[in-house]
Image (cartoon, rainbow, N blue to C red):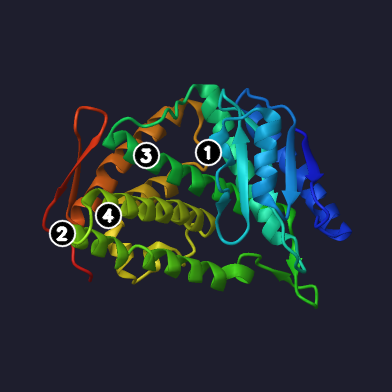
């Protein structure tokens, strides 16, 4: 796989960073080729755009490549810079866009590039094996889709963490090697706290306001759903990046960690005990387990705050407000 570096604007990285990014892409292409070839798969060239204007670059790629316009939506921003892996109508990756901002090190950009290439890897294998990510039509399918997206994020960021360790060596002024993730630990922990604070007390309060007749139940549900979906996606990112080092949600005393436990605990237990990228003959068993955890775990989270969701039989949703079963620890 040849990864072509494209710098799209006048604010492109300085020359010394360009060389580092180009060398990193060469390494990443070799790693992806090896992983795909071991599965009897191959992949063509992929353009990687590094830019300070990610939204504009994504929109330009979508228009140039004739992709679904939904992909021009706000790119994913996790831990700072944003990025996006773009796919064609057959769900085949065709481009990656990654953010850049001024700084003494290109590490942040490399991390975004690596994360999006992790998505490319997962999407490429899943598509080749016939995995379907059709738009969900039921409550259960919606919860399954969230679980699959969280698992994909975890695995993409786990791949990114390993790739960055291989391709970027940090050192202090004396030349002593530095754990690159130690450099960003405080930032990640702050992100985790902000994430959890966006869920509790906000989500229980939204449902309580609907129960008290102070807001529309459907409006409250969709606001709660958006917050939970964003939280699960970001948790996949944090857990994948710091898997197993004790700084993730499992070590948090924030009450939101307890509220979300029915979903994240079985999901991350499954992901931590599974290969980063499952073998071809295990792919669908793994996907089925992630779907099951999503159906059961996310439904349990909603029920804990007193919200029951059912399909109304007409392609819509019925909501029932009940007494919450969860209280903050």
Residue at x-position 67% and y-position 33%: 63
Q: Is residue 282 above or below residue 153?
A: above
Residue 245 percent location from the top left of the image: 49, 64
Residue farthest to the left, as pictured: 323
Q: Tell whether 111 sits left or right of 234.
A: right
Q: Is residue 50 above or below residue 178?
A: above
Q: Tell whether 231 sits left or right of 172.
A: left
Q: Is residue 203 above or below residue 31?
A: below
**Which badge, 3 or 1, is on the more N-terminal residue?**
1
**Which badge, 2 or 1, is on the more N-terminal residue?**
2
Residue 59 percent location from the top left of the image: 65, 41
Measure how far apart labels 3 and 1 are at the Cα level: 13 Å
Count residues near mark 4 (Cα–Cα under 10 Å), then give few for <14, some for 14-19, many for 20+: many
Q: Which residue is mark 1?
A: 277
Q: Which residue is mark 4?
A: 220
Q: Tell whether 322 sits left or right of 257.
A: left
């Amino acid at each position: 796989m040849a990864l072509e570096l494209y710098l799209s604007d006048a604010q492109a990285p300085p020359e010394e960073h360009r060389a580092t990014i180009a060398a990193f892409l060469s390494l990443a292409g070799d790693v992806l080729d090896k992983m795909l070839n071991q599965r009897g798969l191959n992949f063509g060239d992929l353009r990687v755009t590094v830019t300070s204007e990610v939204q504009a670059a994504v929109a330009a790629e979508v228009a140039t490549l004739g992709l679904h316009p939904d992909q021009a939506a706000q790119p994913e921003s996790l831990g700072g810079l944003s990025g996006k892996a773009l796919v064609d109508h057959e769900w085949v990756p065709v481009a990656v866009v990654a953010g850049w901002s001024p700084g003494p090190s290109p590490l942040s950009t490399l991390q975004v590039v690596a994360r999006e290439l992790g998505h490319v890897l997962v999407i490429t294998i899943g598509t080749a094996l016939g995995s379907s990510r059709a738009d969900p039509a039921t409550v259960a399918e919606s919860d399954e889709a969230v679980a699959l997206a969280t698992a994909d994020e975890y695995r993409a960021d786990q791949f990114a963490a390993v790739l960055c360790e291989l391709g970027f060596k940090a050192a202090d002024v004396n030349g002593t090697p530095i754990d690159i993730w130690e450099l960003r630990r405080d930032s990640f922990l702050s992100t985790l706290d902000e994430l959890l604070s966006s869920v509790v007390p906000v989500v229980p309060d939204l449902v309580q306001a609907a129960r008290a007749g102070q807001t529309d139940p459907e409006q409250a549900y969709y606001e709660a759903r958006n917050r939970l979906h964003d939280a699960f996606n970001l948790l996949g990112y944090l857990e994948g990046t710091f898997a197993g080092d004790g700084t993730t949600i499992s070590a948090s005393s924030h009450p939101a960690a307890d509220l979300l436990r029915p979903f994240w605990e079985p999901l991350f237990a499954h992901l931590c005990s599974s290969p980063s990228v499952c073998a071809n003959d295990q792919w669908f068993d793994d996907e089925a387990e992630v779907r099951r955890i999503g159906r059961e775990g996310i439904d349990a989270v909603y029920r804990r705050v007193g919200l029951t969701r059912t399909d109304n039989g007409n392609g819509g949703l019925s909501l029932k407000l009940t007494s919450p079963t969860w209280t903050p620890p």
